[in-house]
Image (cartoon, rainbow, N blue to C red):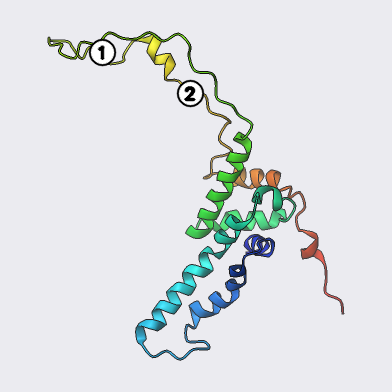
Amino acid sequence: MNFEKKILKTSKIPQRKLLHPSSVAMVKPDTGVEIKKKSAYYVIRDCATIANEYIPLKCYSSISNPIHTLKGAFSKADIIDFVARTKKDTSTKQLLYVIFSDIYKQEADGWTPPPAPVDTESLEIDADATGEDIYGDYGYGDEKYDDANSITMPVKPPVDLGDGEAVIAKLVAVFGANKEETPAETETPAS
């Protein structure tokens, strides 16, 4: 969970400090409080569980320009562990989706849409028309109008989010995680 802890460390919101207390409260909801109603025990436990799962997402979302701000914060090992956990953990997968949404937006920022088609003809429509074939081939074979409906995507979608190796490669490239561990992980405590 180093990936999420580094997000929390970068975030400045006060809720970033709730990860440890929520992990305690979700296992032992009566820690530090006297429970007077049975339902309060379950409310505290479940709220703590939700908080514990979604604090990293809230913290990530609180960071201004998170892709740029978090560049260099993660090691390749952090990213591999994070992506592996997205297979089983829904909240971690949601964080991954938000990160890729930001990556896609950043890559698409420089894109400008193509100009609108200039030569459009107006159709003469008789609203009171009757007959056997008033619906015609409703859009089939009318190349002039079919071409007007084509769009150009701003950028190619980053990766197939179901392909773990491609996701890891993209995150490593985006966050500049070329080392197996970040410097803070390789330091040994002074004796």
Q: Is residue 156 above or below residue 24?
A: above
Label 2 neighbour load within 10 Å: few <14, some 14-19, many 20+: few
The answer to whether residue 112 of the structure is visible from this angle is yes
Residue type marked 1 = Asp
Count of numbered labels shown in the rendering? 2
Horizontal and vertical percent for residue 84? 58, 56
Measuring from the top left, give residue 182's x and y in whole percent: 77, 58
Please report the residue visible at 44 percent of the width from the left and 78 percent of the height from the top.
Answer: 44
Please name whichever residue, 187 or 53, is drawn nearer the observer in this view of the structure.
53
Q: Secondary structure at mark 1?
A: loop
User: Looking at the image, do the residues carrying marks 2 and 1 touch, with CB atoms under 8 Å apart?
Assistant: no
Residue under pointer 2 = 151
Q: Quadrant of residue 191?
A: bottom right
Q: Is residue 145 left or right of residue 187?
A: left
Residue 147 on image: x %, y %: 43, 14
Residue depicted at 35% across the width and 82% down the height: 39
Q: Residue at x 38, y 8 (%)?
A: 121
| Label 2 secondary element | loop
Q: Which residue is more in the foreground, 127 or 113?
A: 127
Q: Residue at x 67, y 58 (%)?
A: 78
Estimate the spatial distance between the alpha carbons at disc 2 and disc 1, rounded to whole Å: 23 Å
Q: Residue furthest right?
A: 191
Q: From this viewpoint, is residue 89 visible?
A: no
Q: Quadrant of the N terminus?
A: bottom right
Vertical relation: 169 (above or below) 39: above
Figure check: 75 above or below 31: above
- Horizontal and vertical percent position of residue 73: 73, 56
Residue identifier under label 1: 137
Query: Left or right: where does residue 116 sit relative to residue 182?
Result: left
Q: For the residue carrying disc 1, how many other residues have a C-alpha within 10 Å: few (<14), some (14-19), or many (20+)?
A: few
